[in-house]
Image (cartoon, rainbow, N blue to C red):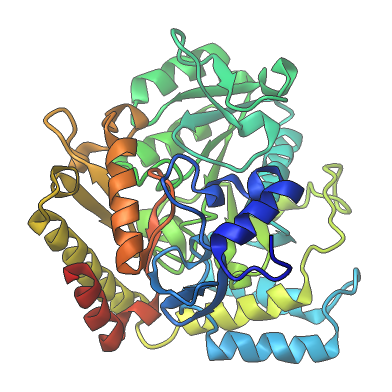
Amino acid sequence: MTLFPDTSSELFQRAKIVTPGGVHSPVRSFKGLHTTPRFIKNGKGAYITDEENKTYIDFLMSFGPLMFGHQDPDVKNVIQETLNEGWSFGATEKHSLFLAEYMVEHLPFIEQVRFVNSGTEAVMAALRLARGFTGRKKILKFNGCYHGHLDSMLLRAGSGVADLPEASSLGISPEAIEHTIICDLDNEQAVEEIFKKYGNEIAAIAIEPIPANNGLLPQRLEYLKFLREISSKYGSLLLFDEVISGFRVAFGGMTELTGIKPDLVTYGKIIGAGLPVGALAGNRNIMEYLAPCGGVYQAGTLSANPMAMRAGLVTLKKLKQNNFYQTLEKTSQTIVHLLQDWSKKTSLPEIQKLNWTRFGSLFWPVSQDKNSQTSEMRSLVKIPESLNADFKILFELLLNKGVYIAPNAFEVGFISSAHGDEKVLADLKKKLLN
């Protein structure tokens, strides 16, 4: 082993000695793939470069927050300015105020914001707040929605009875999930039965309004409206987890696109421009149950870090300019069309049968067979069994061509404004043809 290895494989071998699996988040491990995780040394615009100096068109975009690509000059400048002032105080400062004011001003469905350090932390605080506000214990979640790695939400539907969950990780006690109810998406009848049984005990319904962590599973507007109606009927809160979709599918996320007003919303990723951040937001009467106003405790030493707050504000202001979302929509249409057209023309049957599902600037390559229609793929039970095997072939094929997507069959792809550059589009065409 060399002192200063210059390949990803050498770095990965060293990393596995001092870090579980060699990674700090499991999806980075390339588990199940026949290749080594690429160690990335820099990114610029739509591109990333690994330690072997191979450059890729990047459709990971740090799992979503880099709306303008890597090293956007405006974001970079404000981070550098902040470094000269100090990057952590553990005290009140104006930048979190400015970002909160901007969000409240431009998101008519919220009145207050509390910043935290991750999407997981935002959901954890939101669920505690929902329980504290309603005085109830139970949470209803859906199979196929991911809300971070907190114990009470890291579970899947058990076999047989729809509302009995199973932990999807070791180390989670039965007591941690005993008040979580789970059912499949896109099933009004199951939700109605759950509320008939537990309605007066349910503090909140938690849902990704567009599930994008177990594939891309767009929900019917009628179904989301149904969840709003039944939660209101029983006095439960409706939580929209917009950690991925917030500020990506529209400035106001799915909340804006659906016109449905949830009681609580959680955010992450984009509001920190890729720096560690999360937030929960809602009406004042609910939010002020949080300490120090109310009895629901939540705290964080690095919450509202000035670097993330300033980078986030610059990002949100840029998203409001120059018809950003309309332009990003056109770019996304072009890119997904290129990928779909390439798939159909390949000689590999596993690639030919892929359908590149898209919602805004999110996309997902999914196998399509006679038993699965992607236009109706709104729950995990619709996903074909061949997905993982087909994805392995796709991922390694694209990686060799210099196109980087998330190394997991159930993760979505992200498109930034940087991908709309004509040179990038021309390069993508060239890479796909090679």
Position of residue 298 measured from the top left corner of the image (x, y, whole percent): 82, 48
Quadrant holding the N terminus = bottom right
Q: In which quarter of the image is the C terminus?
A: bottom left
Question: For this rendering, which residue is in front, 419 or 248?
Answer: 419
In x, y percent, where is residue 350?
A: 19, 43
Give the percent coordinates (x, y) of residue 138. 64, 24
- Looking at the image, is 37 positioned above or below residue 248? above
The part of the image, by quadrant, that contains residue 113 is bottom right
What residue lies at 46% left-to-right and 64% top-to-bottom? 252
Side (left or right) of 141 relative to 428: right
Compared with residue 101, is residue 246 higher up or lower down, i.e. above or below? above
Residue shown at the point (46%, 79%) measured from the top left = 68
Foreground: 275 or 231? 275
Is 68 on the left or on the right of 9, as rendered? left
Residue 275 shows up from this direction: yes
Residue at 69% over, 31% down: 151
Outermost residue, front direction?
Answer: 1
Q: Is residue 356 above or below residue 316?
A: above
How many discs mark residues in the rendered view? 0
Query: Is residue 110 among the parts visible in the rendering?
Result: no
Image quadrant where residue 116 sits:
bottom right
Residue depicted at x 12% and y 56%: 346
